[in-house]
Image (cartoon, rainbow, N blue to C red):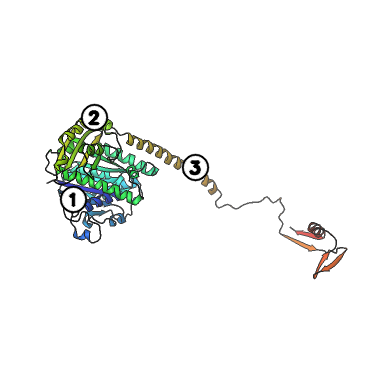
């Protein structure tokens, strides 16, 4: 039986790990999926393999949100409430806490393979994952793969920078391969953000469970961990996963085609142009699994990518489903992300320069600190002014409604003119 370690790193990784645990509950029973509440206390995770799950986070609230992951499987980095999408700070925190993290991981059985699930754009996940894999590989020789979720391209400059630098570090480090998942995929799901994120978390969890089950199953045509390692070692160290499932009786050739199409892949790519190796796992009732259709589609894919491992799992009475793992020799969509990251870096640099200039401008105001205004003594300084009014006696007066008014048609301006003529001014300086 295969021994597997699943690590969910940061908020995104925690949520996907929790979805994996949710889907694994009550499998094979009349309850298809646990729904939270009391079920999480009375349900058990049912994996085909020996699976250990660990959630790591600097934010305690993210760990508290997990409904299907046991408390003993959650590692909180103490005295922190996240690292604010700051990878530099996050790496410093990991360096300080790596002894504790590695000690807690070493308490678990040694796995045959490990997967670290994380977002590329946030703080904890993107900053912890490269050094965490590096620490694991220093003492163990089992393969460690990163499942990396990429940000929306319009999600912000900080996230694009984080994603670009994290992927660079993973590819230059000892990570055995990076499986890409793109949040751009969320746009095809629709609905509100929460439903979209929950949907993609569930999609990733289903594909990962399918893969783990397949690597530890008896097959008519076998694919195992050794084949998976060979596939993941090809190309540029990048990969993605495709999936398709029949809802009605569907020709198997259509499912294979759908699994490698953009709508079936978690990262958009032209498989026939950019893939370098592939593994296809087909599961379902044998009446749906036409060997001629399977062979034709596999041959077409082989002619483009070079080598395709295939496995077939017979499950009586079940509609077929297909999982594809594809390693990539190039990724045009990823090049677009890096172009966005370069623009983001330049934008942030411009902002810093502007702030620096504003600080220099502020310093000019500081130059008069402690000083008082001074005035030249030649100027007259008026301390007081006495104003006296002489009696104003219009030549013609009459009373109207109890008020004394001047006769004639003189305007208000005439009145004030007369007033000013009859003011005596005296100044004391």
Crowding near pointer 3: few (<14 within 10 Å), some, many (20+)? few
Q: Which mark is residue 52?
A: 1
Disc 3, SS: helix
Q: Name the residue rendered at 40%, 37% in the picture.
A: 343
Please say if the residues under marks 3 and 2 sit with CB atoms less than 8 Å apart: no
Q: Position of residue 131 (x, y in %)?
A: 26, 43
Crowding near pointer 2: few (<14 within 10 Å), some, many (20+)? some
Position of 153 compared to 3: left or right?
right
Q: Which residue does the numbered mark 3 point to in the structure image? A: 357
Q: Position of residue 48 (x, y in %)?
A: 15, 49
Question: Which residue, as the protein is rendered here, is positioned at the far front?
Answer: 249
Give the mark nearer the N terminus: 3 vs 1: 1
Give the mark nearer the N terminus: 2 vs 1: 1
Disc 2, SS: helix
Q: Nearer the viewer, residue 311 or 104?
A: 311
Q: Is residue 211 visible?
A: yes
Question: Which residue, as the protein is rendered here, is positioned at the far top?
Answer: 303
Task: Name the quadrant of the C terminus.
Answer: bottom right
Q: Which residue does the numbered mark 2 point to in the structure image? A: 304
Disc 1, SS: strand
Q: CA distance from mark 3 to mark 1?
A: 53 Å
Which quarter of the picture shows residue 427? Answer: bottom right
Q: Position of residue 307 (x, y in %)?
A: 19, 31
Q: CA distance from mark 3 to mark 2?
A: 55 Å
Q: Nearer the viewer, mark 3 or mark 1?
A: 1
Q: Is residue 215 above or below residue 26?
A: above
Which quarter of the picture shows residue 332? Answer: top left
Q: Nearer the viewer, residue 350 or 97?
A: 350
Q: Is residue 234 visible?
A: no
């Amino acid at each position: 039986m295969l021994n597997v370690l699943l690590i969910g790193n940061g908020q995104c990784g925690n949520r996907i790990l929790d979805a994996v645990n949710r889907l694994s509950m009550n499998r094979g029973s009349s309850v298809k999926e646990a729904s939270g509440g009391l079920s999480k206390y009375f349900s058990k995770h049912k994996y085909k393999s020996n699976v250990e799950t660990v959630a790591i986070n600097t934010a305690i609230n993210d760990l508290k949100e997990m409904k299907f992951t046991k408390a003993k499987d959650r590692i909180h980095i103490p005295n922190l409430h996240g690292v604010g999408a700051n990878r530099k700070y996050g790496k410093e925190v990991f360096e300080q806490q790596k002894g504790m993290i590695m000690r807690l991981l070493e308490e678990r059985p040694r796995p045959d393979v490990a997967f670290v699930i994380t977002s590329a754009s946030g703080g904890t996940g993107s900053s912890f994952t490269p050094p965490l894999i590096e620490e694991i590989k220093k003492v163990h020789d089992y393969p460690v793969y990163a499942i990396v979720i990429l940000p929306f391209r319009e999600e912000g400059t900080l996230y694009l920078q984080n994603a670009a630098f994290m992927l660079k570090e993973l590819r230059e480090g000892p990570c055995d391969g990076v499986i890409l998942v793109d949040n751009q995929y969320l746009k095809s799901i629709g609905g509100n953000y929460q439903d979209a994120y929950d949907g993609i978390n569930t999609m990733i969890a289903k594909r990962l469970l399918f893969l783990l089950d397949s690597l530890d199953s008896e097959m008519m045509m076998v694919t195992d961990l050794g084949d998976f390692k060979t596939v993941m070692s090809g190309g540029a160290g990048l990969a993605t996963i495709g999936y398709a499932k029949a809802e009605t009786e569907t020709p198997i050739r259509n499912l294979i085609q759908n699994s490698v199409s953009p709508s079936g892949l978690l990262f958009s790519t032209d498989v026939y142009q950019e893939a370098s190796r592939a593994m296809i796992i087909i599961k379902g009732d044998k009446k749906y699994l036409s060997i001629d259709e399977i062979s034709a589609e596999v041959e077409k894919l082989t002619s483009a990518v070079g080598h395709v491992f295939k496995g077939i799992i017979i499950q009586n009475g079940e509609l077929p489903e297909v999982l594809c793992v594809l390693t990539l020799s190039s990724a045009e969509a990823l090049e677009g992300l890096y172009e966005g990251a370069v623009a983001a870096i330049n934008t942030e640099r411009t902002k810093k320069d502007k702030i620096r200039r504003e600080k220099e401008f502020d310093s000019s105001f500081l130059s008069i600190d402690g000083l008082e205004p001074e005035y030249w003594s030649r100027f007259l300084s008026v301390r007081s002014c006495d104003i006296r009014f002489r009696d104003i006696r219009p030549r013609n007066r009459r009373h109207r409604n109890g008020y004394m008014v001047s006769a004639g048609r003189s305007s208000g301006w005439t009145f004030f003119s007369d007033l000013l003529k009859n003011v005596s001014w005296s100044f004391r300086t």
